[in-house]
Image (cartoon, grey):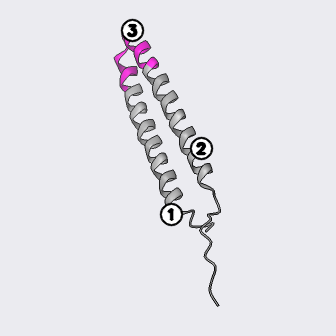
């Protein structure tokens, strides 16, 4: 008696691709908004707010890239609690 191996995952690949694409789009929008905020702050001559915006930009971009890496990992290996 042979076992039938199912290669289907509980979460389809198209869902992961959509989630990854939306995350990239959100990361781009946030980066552009922070760039505009930084330029606006630069034009007003407030260096303290530029440093705060730069720190926030770094944290959000690193967090967004980590989220994308997590999505790619879960797409490749599956969700451990569900599969």
Q: Quadrant of the C terminus?
A: bottom right
Q: Residue at x 54, y 44 (%)?
A: 20
- Quick one: 1 or 40, which is closer to the camera? 1
Looking at marks 3 and 2 on the same chain, the residue that comes earlier in the sequence is marked by 2
- Residue 6: percent from left, percent from top: 62, 72
State the residue at coordinates (49%, 34%): 27
The residue indicated by pointer 1 is: 77
- C-beta proximity under 8 Å, tags 3 and 1: no
For marks 3 and 1, the one nearer the N-term is 3
Q: Nearer the viewer, residue 80 or 2?
A: 2
Separation of residues labelled 2 and 1 (CA atoms): 17 Å
Density class for disc 3 (Cα within 10 Å; few <14, some 14-19, many ≥20) is few
Disc 2 crowd, CA 10 A, few/some/many (<14, 14-19, 20+) = few
Q: Which is in the foreground here, disc 3 or disc 2?
A: 2
CA gap, disc 3 and disc 1: 47 Å
| Secondary structure category for the residue under label 2 | helix
Q: Residue at x 52, y 58 (%)?
A: 74
* Labelled disc at residue 43: 3
Q: Position of residue 21 (x, y in %)?
A: 54, 40
Quadrant where the image shows the N terminus: bottom right
Q: Which label's residue is closer to the chain start, 2 or 1? A: 2
Residue 25 part of the magenta-drawn span: no
The answer to whether 26 is drawn above or below residue 39 in the figure is: below
Magenta part of the chain:
36-51
Q: Which mark is residue 18?
A: 2
Question: Quick one: SS at disc 1?
Answer: helix
């Amino acid at each position: 008696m042979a076992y039938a191996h199912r290669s289907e995952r509980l979460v389809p690949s198209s869902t992961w691709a959509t989630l990854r694409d939306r995350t990239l789009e959100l990361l781009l929008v946030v980066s552009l908004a922070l760039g505009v905020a930084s330029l606006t702050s630069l034009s007003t001559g407030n260096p303290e707010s530029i440093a705060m915006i730069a720190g926030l930009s770094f944290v959000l971009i690193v967090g967004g890239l980590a989220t994308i890496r997590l999505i790619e990992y879960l797409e490749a290996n599956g969700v451990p609690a569900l599969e």
